[in-house]
Each structure stands twice: as C-alpha cells, then as structure tokens.
Amino acid sequence: MPERLEQSAAGRFDTVLIANRGEIAARIQRACRELGLKTVAICSEADRHAPYGKTADSFLCIGPSTAAKSYLNQDAILLAARLAGAGAVHPGYGFLSENAAFSDAVEKAGLTFIGPTASSIATMGDKISAKRAMIAAGVPCVPGPDTALPDDPATIEHIALEIGYPVIIKAAGGGGGRGMRVVPKADVLHEAIALTREEARKAFGSPSLYMEKFLQHPRHIEIQVICDDHGNAVWLGHRDCSMQRRHQKVVEEAPAPGIAPDIIQPVGLACVQACLQIGYRGVGTFEFLYEDGAFYFIEMNTRLQVEHPVTELTSGVDIVQAQIRAAQGHGLELNQGDVTCEGHSFECRINAEDPETFLPSAGVVTHLALPAGPGIRVDTHIHAGYKVSPYYDSLIAKLIVHAPTRAEAMTRMREALADTEVEGISTNIPFLRALFEDDAFSRGETDIHYLEQWLKLRRAA
C-alpha cells in the first residue's frame, strides 16, 4: 500500500458546500461529516424543508424553484460558498457536475472543486475528443471516425458506408440519452443528420455530431476509477447497467454477470492508463458497450455516478470519501493489488412516477416504510410528510442490496422491494417488483434493448 501523503496547500479545506439536492446531497453530507468536515447545504425555494438542511452546519437558499435560477446558477452558488466560508464545492451528479466552466470558476474563486480539472472535464465531455484520447490510451472504441461529421452530404454518405449500416448519430456534447438517433439504412441518413443537429444545438449549444456503428445486442458495462494528483490510479471492478428505459438506467448491478476476469482486466487497466495520460483526478466512470466478448468505449462520466453504491458494496471502498480525499491532495490509500471485489450487489432507482405510464408524480409522502437488515442499504432524503417537487428529477430513493452470490442478491432485492412502502404519491416500485420476477433478467440474459421489449410485451398482454 502506498504511503499516505499529506494534503497539499491548494486542497486544504475544512468546509464543503454541496452544490446539489436530494439523496446525493444527503449522501455527500454524510461522507463529509465522517471525514470531520463541515458542510454547507444549499436549496431552492422548493427545497427549503429538505431534511439534510437541518443537519448541515449552514443552510442557504440560493434562488427560486426552477433549477436554472438555483442549482444551475453558478454566481449564486459561489456567493453562497463565500458567505458560508466554504473552502470546497462538491457538485454531486447532474446539474453542474460535468460543467468545465463551473469547475474553472470554482478554482478561480480560490476554492477547491471536488472533481477533475476543467481541462479533463472538457476533454472527456466532448465525445469526439474523448474517443481520440481513448484510442491513444489503447482503450477499445466503437467503430467510427474520431472526428466530427462534415457538412458535405457525399462525405457523410461515404463515412456511413465505410462503417456499415446500421449506424448511430450522436451529439458530440451529448449525454443522458439525448442527442442520438439510429439510422438503419441510407435513405433516411440525411433526415436523421438534420434532426439530430438541431436537437444537439438546442440541448447542448453545439450542432457538432459524430457517427458510429450501431451494435445490435450490446450490454452496458461500466468501469469505476479513482485517481489522485500523485500519479496513482485504480479501477474498482465493473457494473452492468443494461436495464434501461429510453436510455435511462433503472437497475444496476456489480459485478456484470458472465464476464470472465481475463476479459475485463485488460480493459480496466487501459482505463487506468487513460486517466494517467490525461492527468485525471478524483472519481470517474468509463462506459462501454459489450457484445460478443468485445468492449467498445462510448463515453466517460467525469463525476460521481448515481449507481456508485453497488461498487462501494462489492469493493468495500467509500467512493465519496475517496473523491473528497483526492481533492484534498491526499494520495490513494490503496493500490490495484489491494482491490478485491466480493459478492454481488443490485441497485433499484425508486422514482416518483406512475408505474405504468412513467409520468412524474408530485405530492406529499403520507406514509414511508423502508426495509432494513443485513445487506440492505437505502439512500434517500425523503420522509413521511416530505413534499415531492415537480421541478426536478423524479428519483426519490435508491434501494441497494448485497449478498454473497447474484442469486442471493436477487432474492434479497425481491424481499426488500416487498418491504418498501411509499404512500401519497405514485412510485415505480410495482414495476421494479415485476422486473425482479422476470426469468431472463434473473438468468442475466439481457441487453440494453431488453427492458423496452419487456415493457411492450407487458402492455400488449
């Protein structure tokens, strides 16, 4: 194990402003307090009664209910940090977590951004430059050029033919399942390009696109990394996030079933090498498509992931604390030989939404009963009497289980879901209960398209 290094002067802080809300704000606050750090919680008008505000050392309202005027308001967040005497800002996930300009603004204000540098965020946030960096590091990528699509229609047609149909068009600055379109054949190529360019321009401020081979039956596999500022980096095993609806993850598990260690290990080491080449700091996730025994890089998330708990439970590493310690300037407390992943873990995202239509459900939680016991963890910020706002993402809790084997973890999740009760609003719990009774899912025989097909069959029945 490498010698523990003292924190650098640039990373010295004792108070962290949490620039987020909901369950991740509560999770970060807990990690900070366990490290002996003070916390500053912020809120919008809609979140004035958030429970984590009561346990923070400072709690400041920074704007109206809409995210654009509160959680996305960089000036308001930096002002709150100065007023509360914070020395660092933790962005959580979503909102400003992968905004290079915000990372830069935090550092220029004399504060520490708990995450990678603005340069790393910019490099990996643009899918074209990220692909180029991954190719240079030896990380396998989806077939397709590492350049933006030109404007010339004939050249675009030639690129598509060279890749081979079907292809997928993606926004270079995209993410979250937006700004992408599958093109099955040549006669719809230019229409798809035009539609995706406009969608990318509106959603991400840039019409830049790129093209890749569309894989027919891939799984979505992730590799978690942690890096420090002293040339150390490790990967903490892998996750399967294939259970998706409209490109949004619903259930995640670690490790990904059915992938032999000798297949995944070279990919994990390549991810570590990529981090070292770009000088990456903090935590990050490499996302891959996996098909027929081969991995294809699709993007890197330069932030904490929603699904980080499944890796925490299998690796035994507190990823949020490790992220904060890296920002303080500490060296990693483990090397690759120390990383051992044991057992199996599942995470269910519990959303305030109709379990049939998936429309958001706002309102007051009138009754809440959460499961407990060995191998069960719930990350949430809600309680009986909590008002679920219509202004933000519908995620209200994450139910995570861990057991020695995948089969035992499946059983534990079924029991945990049966013991979970939320009344006053609609949730997707009935949908999750049904999913965990599905035979193909139980056997680990699914891909990223499976859940959409499963839902269609249920509706038709």
Image: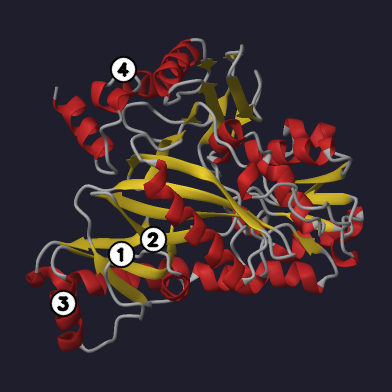
Q: Secondary structure at mark 2?
A: strand
For the residues labelled 4 and 3, the Cα–Cα distance comes to 43 Å
Q: Which residue is mark 4?
A: 437
> In the rendered structure, which disc, 1 or 4, sits on the residue that comes first in sequence?
1
Specify the label residue 142 is tagged with.
1
**Residue 407 at x, y percent in the picture:** 39, 19
The residue at 87%/58% (across/down) is: 7
| Mark 2 or 1, nearer chain start | 1
Q: Earlier in the sequence, mark 4 or mark 3?
A: 3
> Residue 176, can we see it?
no
| Secondary structure type for disc 3 | helix
Q: Residues within 10 Å of mark 1 (few under 14, many from 20)?
A: many
Q: Is residue 144 above or below residue 28?
A: below
**Which amino acid type corresponds to the residue marked 3 in the rendered image?**
Glu
> Which residue was labeled with disc 2?
297
Q: Which mark is residue 162?
A: 3
Mark 4 or 2, which is nearer the eye?
2
Q: Tags 1 and 3 in contact by the CB under 8 Å rule?
A: no
Specify few, some or many for label 4: CA neighbours under 10 Å numbering under 14, 14-19, or 20 or more: few
Residue 285 drawn above or below residue 55 = below
- Left or right: where does residue 86 sit relative to residue 63? right
Residue drawn at 15 percent across, 82 percent down: 158
Q: Quadrant of residue 230?
A: bottom right
Residue 244 percent location from the top left of the image:
35, 41
**Residue 48 percent location from the top left of the image:** 74, 38
Q: CA distance from mark 1 to mark 4?
A: 33 Å
Query: Taking 117 as reference, is 133 left or right?
Result: left
Task: Of the two numbered discs 4 and 2 on the same chain, state the one appearing first in sequence.
Answer: 2
